[in-house]
Amino acid sequence: MNIVVAIKHIPSIADDLPVKGNNVDFDSVDFVLNEWDEHSIEQAVLIKEAVGGTVTVVGVDLIGELDNALHLALAKGADKVVKITADDPAADSHQQAKWLAEAIKGMGADMVFAGVQASNDIDGQIGPMIAAYLDMPYIGGTSAIEVSGSTATVSKEFPGGVGMKYAVTLPFVAGVQSAPKPPRYAPVSKVRQMAQTATVEKVAPSGEASSGLAFKKMAPPVVTGHAEMIEGSPKEVAAKIVELLKSRGLA
Amino acid sequence: MSNDVFVITEHLDGKFSDVSFEVAGKAKELAKALGGQAIAVVVGGGVDANVFASDSTIQVDDAALSQFNPEAYAKVIEALVKEKSPRVVLFGWTVTGMDVAAWLSAKLGVPCAAYAKDVRAEGGGVVVSCQAYGGKLTAEVAPEGETAIVACLAGSFPAEAGQGSTAATKIASPVDLSGLKMKFVEMLKPVAGDVDITAQTKLVSVGRGIGGKENIELAEELAAKLGAVVSASRPVVDAGWLPRTRQVGKSGLKVKPKLYLMLGISGAPEHLEGMKSAELIIAINTDKKAPIFNVAHYGATADLFEVAEAMLELL
């Protein structure tokens, strides 16, 4: 089984996101692995452990700092890692998906996984776009994928705890919502060992695509309301909350 | 090219989702401004499609479309968009809309604006407000070209405006649906047994800020003292710290308790979809810029563990 996982390096939303012109000030933010990618890597490794095969993780190196994420993927069980050396922090999903699809084309993938979404998917997610560019069907929001022969059984999540099961003939692209198990932990020592010993294959970006979106403005949301903030030490905050709840008959 | 606005509706188990009506209402407003028609598209039979306030409704009936099938739905919608060349194609940014919108964009080479909170007609085209970066930034984007795909967050527009009784025109699938690579197998209903968080009057809801499975106990203790139940945001459930039955939000459950006490939840749009109608929302988060503070009634920038422990002493 040959599984390719396409990952996305995105600005961290844990910190402030400064704006420059009509976009994020990419020079002033940290880039991190899209959180759903951890699940798609886990899903791929689980399938490899069940039926054998190889897991290749490929991503666009937007700012020259993708190696950390790739070493982490190796420490979690990926066999091979590839970076597309784009050096373009503003590359949108369409452009990244095109580069990824071109890189994946020659890999003979039985399945391509991507995170179901990323917080900067303003022009949509890379998963369905890679599927369109590779002419493969796409299914997103997956919570479990099992493979038997040339067919995968895919569980897709719906709201309210409902799930749907599909039988999918390989090859296809999946947008992973969650792996059936929480993403495994990779010890720092193992990641460090990968950083010292592993080879990251480099591929030049090939192909062009654009979101077709003209950015007019980027700013923190216009706030229509704001919470009444409770100030003070944690103890004071706690006292005020308890008082509030008691006054409303909720405690 | 036309100035029509397509709205791709979605249904499950014979029932349309709220977002379908919300987006249908928006489609009507947009179509009017653009000088076109609002056309509701219903993929699949087995549902009463005469429920939208659209100018017209198309219902594509085919046995292969009886349940949501990403591959079949995408093919049908692609064919309809190619045939009718609408100015705008509105989707919900939902578990089904997300399977098709971006695929269609790449397939047809037309723009897609996702995480849409608002969309308005401007200069013959549309301008879309996208709530990106976990709700921390809003991008105003103008899709270029003759067709624009817009995927709208649930809860962005009133549903009432989309409700009506326009009679649907049933058509056969515009594409051959034999030889699909994806086949629907079965629907898995939620497993009963755990508490029903939608039935609770009080919820203590934990997010990524809770840090680990070992800290859930603190939330449980606090909930017990308050006569509440512990619920969670998606990352907590995906990490396996709480079962799926406790998840609030887009891919989880919608709740409307009297009290929603949030510990370490930043308030991504997906979570807000599930809880913003709660009567009293109190949020504790260390990030003073967390979007949840724009929605909560009361908030505190504080360490959730210290506040929770102090609350336990007082209750």
Image (cartoon, coloured by chain):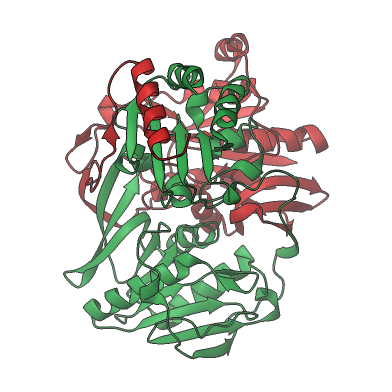
Left or right of A220 on screen, residue B9: right
Q: Quadrant of the N terminus of chain B?
A: bottom left
Residue for point 82% across, 38% down: A51
The image quadrant of residue B67 is bottom right
Left or right of B197 on screen, residue B9: left
Compared with residue A229, is residue A139 higher up or lower down, i.e. above or below? below
Left or right of A221 on screen, residue B208: right
**Residue placed most toward the observer, A96 or B130:** B130
Residue for point 48% across, 34% down: A251
Q: Position of residue B211 (x, y in %)?
A: 53, 22
Compared with residue A74, is residue B240 higher up or lower down, i.e. above or below? below
Residue for point 65% across, 44% down: B245
Q: Position of residue A73 (x, y in %)?
A: 59, 26
Q: Is residue A31 visible?
A: yes
Colour seen for chain A: red
Q: Position of residue A173 (x, y in %)?
A: 61, 51
**In the figure, the green chain has which letter?**
B
Q: Position of residue B244 (x, y in %)?
A: 65, 42
Q: Is residue A98 visible?
A: no
Residue for point 36% across, 38% down: B292
**Residue placed most toward the observer, A140 or A49:** A140
Compared with residue A167, is residue A80 higher up or lower down, i.e. above or below? above
Left or right of A156 on screen, residue B253: left
**Residue placed most toward the observer, B8 or B202:** B202
